[in-house]
């Protein structure tokens, strides 16, 4: 992982988290780790609904 950020929104019940990876393969490797699974398990217990995930690519 290159970067991780949590941002507040106008709605105090909503936040945005951003993770940056060097490649999709790097993300997939991270997603298979026990730490990633533990994080998602903890998040499920505190979120009103499941995470929304988007994959973005840099502009040329």
Image (spheres, rainbow, N blue to C red):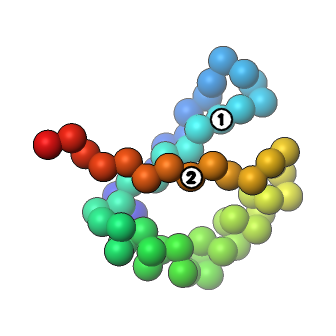
Would you name the residue on which mark 2 appears? 53
Which label lies toward us, 1 or 2?
A: 2
Q: Quadrant of residue 58?
A: top left
Dots 1 and 2: beta carbons under 8 Å?
no
Residue 15: give its label.
Answer: 1
What kind of element bears circle 2? loop
- In the picture provided, is 2 more to the left or to the right than 45? left
State the mark number for residue 44. Answer: none
- CA gap, disc 1 to disc 2? 13 Å
- Residue found 61% across the figure and 28% down from its top: 8
| Image quadrant where one finds the N terminus | bottom left
Callout 1 secondary element: strand
Which x, y percent locates residue 10?
66, 18
- Which image quarter holds the C terminus? top left
* Residue positioned 36% across, 67% down in the render: 24
| Image quadrant where residue 39 sits | bottom right
Spot occupied by residue 2 in the image (x, y as percentages of width and height): 34, 58
Picture coordinates of residue 54 (x, y %)?
A: 50, 49
The tally of labels here is 2
Q: Residue at x 35, y 74 (%)?
A: 25
Mark 2, residues whose alpha carbon is within 10 Å: few (<14), some, or many (≥20)?
few
Instruction: Give the camera-side residue of 56 and 7.
Output: 56
């Amino acid at each position: 992982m290159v970067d991780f950020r949590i941002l507040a929104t106008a709605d105090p019940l909503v936040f945005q988290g951003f993770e940056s990876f060097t490649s999709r393969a790097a993300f997939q490797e991270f997603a298979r780790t026990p730490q990633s699974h533990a994080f998602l398990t903890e998040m499920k217990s505190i979120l009103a609904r499941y995470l929304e995930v988007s994959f973005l690519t840099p502009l040329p």
